[in-house]
Image (cartoon, grey):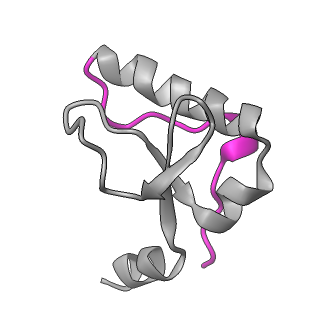
Amino acid sequence: MAQLKQWREQNWVRIGTDGAIKGPCGTSKDKKNPDRCLPKRKALSLTKTERAATARKKKKAGAKGRTVVANTPKAKVKSKS
């Protein structure tokens, strides 16, 4: 339960394949192959190209049926323990 609270406090946002921030996480219309989500702070620290790369990786693997897809090295999210 503490992890969910921490996730909400980080204000996660949805990243489109063009690298743009599309809105809050969980608002993707495509439920079978959703967009990449990142904490807003992390998303803003990446360039638009870096955000696009991790989003495209998620969409490509999602099209093959995978639901859990690792981020690109630059987009890795480190948890605050």
Q: Main secondary structure of the magenta part?
A: loop
Using the image, determine if residue 23 lies above or below residue 71: below
**Residue closest to the far left:** 32
Residue 14 covered by magenta stretch? no
Closer to the camera in the image, 17 or 7? 17
Q: Quadrant of residue 48?
A: top right
Closer to the camera in the image, 73 or 16? 16
**Where, quadrant-wise, is the N terminus in this rendering?**
bottom left
Q: Is residue 8 left or right of residue 73?
A: left
Using the image, determine if residue 74 lies above or below residue 23: above
The residue shown at (25%, 20%) is: 65
Where does the image place residue 56, in percent across and percent down from the top left? 53, 24
**Where, quadrant-wise, is the C terminus in this rendering?**
bottom right
Badge count: 0
Residue 78 covered by magenta stretch? yes
Q: Which residues are magenta?
A: 65-81
Using the image, determine if residue 9 lies above or below residue 65: below
Q: Is residue 29 left or right of residue 20?
A: left
Q: Quadrant of residue 4?
A: bottom left
Where does the image place residue 26, in percent across and percent down from the top left? 31, 56
The residue shown at (60%, 42%) is: 20
Using the image, determine if residue 54 lies above or below residue 4: above
**Residue closest to the far top:** 64
The residue shown at (60%, 68%) is: 79
The residue shown at (76%, 41%) is: 74
Where does the image place residue 55, in percent across and percent down from the top left? 54, 33
Q: Quadrant of residue 49?
A: top right
Where does the image place residue 12, in percent across and percent down from the top left? 49, 64
